[in-house]
Amino acid sequence: MPNRKLLTLAIAVSLVALLVAVGYWNVSPERFLDNPKASVDAATIDYYAVNAHTVQYLPDGKMQYEMTADRVEHLKASEITHVTKPVMDIYRGTTFPWHVVSERAEVNPDGTQVELIDAVRLNRTDQQNRATVITTSRAMVFPQKQYAETDQDVRIDGAGGVTTAKGMKAYLNDSKIHLLSTVRGQYEAR
């Protein structure tokens, strides 16, 4: 009888060991590594800043631009940055910057493109103390290229008059503005 109990016990222990081995075999570590990634809400903000201040320099050490904003929010899914009340001075390595303001802006993931939205204003005073003010509802600015463009209505105040147009390409480094269509001008007679 004791042999029979030992035999039954040995068979039971063997079966339990076999079941544990099969269970371990089916629960492989790879099963835990291949977990599907959790979905990310497109509006999830992964970081933000209040009263942000940024300065970018050219390779020669001169200031390229300086930007301040009430709030900056970076969206995790799209990598786009939303900026509230941005104020940017684009120096172009000179002492006479373009002063750029809008209600809000969106910056692409690599920072090469800034879309200014609502109440956009670009202004500059040159060496002879002449002011040029450009206003529009939306504009795309490329800070590294010193370039801005829009397909919206544009108003330019400066040089003794007012010019309006539909669309614009502004080469900020050269202070040249190409108006795209429906150009109208009103100038003061001297």
Image (cartoon, grey):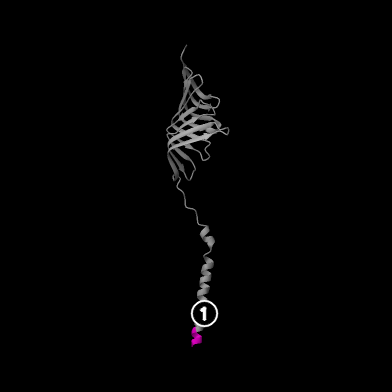
- The dominant secondary structure in magenta is helix
Please identify the residue farthest to the top as the structure is shown.
190
Please identify the residue farthest to the front as the structure is shown.
61
Q: Disc 1 residue type?
A: Ile
Instruction: Give yes or no for residue 3 being in the magenta stretch.
Output: yes
The residue that appears at 53% across and 66% down in the rendered structure is 26
Q: Nearer the viewer, residue 168 or 81?
A: 81
Q: Nearer the viewer, residue 102 or 39?
A: 102
The secondary structure type at the circle numbered 1 is helix
* Any part of residue 163 in sight: no
Find the magenta span and give its range.
1-5
| Residue 121 occupies quadrant | top left
* Any part of residue 73 in sight: yes
Image vertical order of residue 130 relative to residue 93, above or below: above
How far across and how far down the image is residue 1, in percent?
49, 88
Image vertical order of residue 146 relative to residue 71, above or below: above
Image vertical order of residue 28 relative to residue 180, above or below: below
How far across and how far down the image is residue 103, in percent?
42, 33
How far across and how far down the image is residue 87, in percent?
45, 32
Instruction: Give yes or no for residue 168 being in the magenta stretch.
Output: no
The residue that appears at 47% across and 29% down in the rendered structure is 100
Marks counted in the figure total 1
How far across and how far down the image is residue 62, in percent?
54, 31
Residue identified by numbered label 1: 11
Please identify the residue farthest to the right as the structure is shown.
60
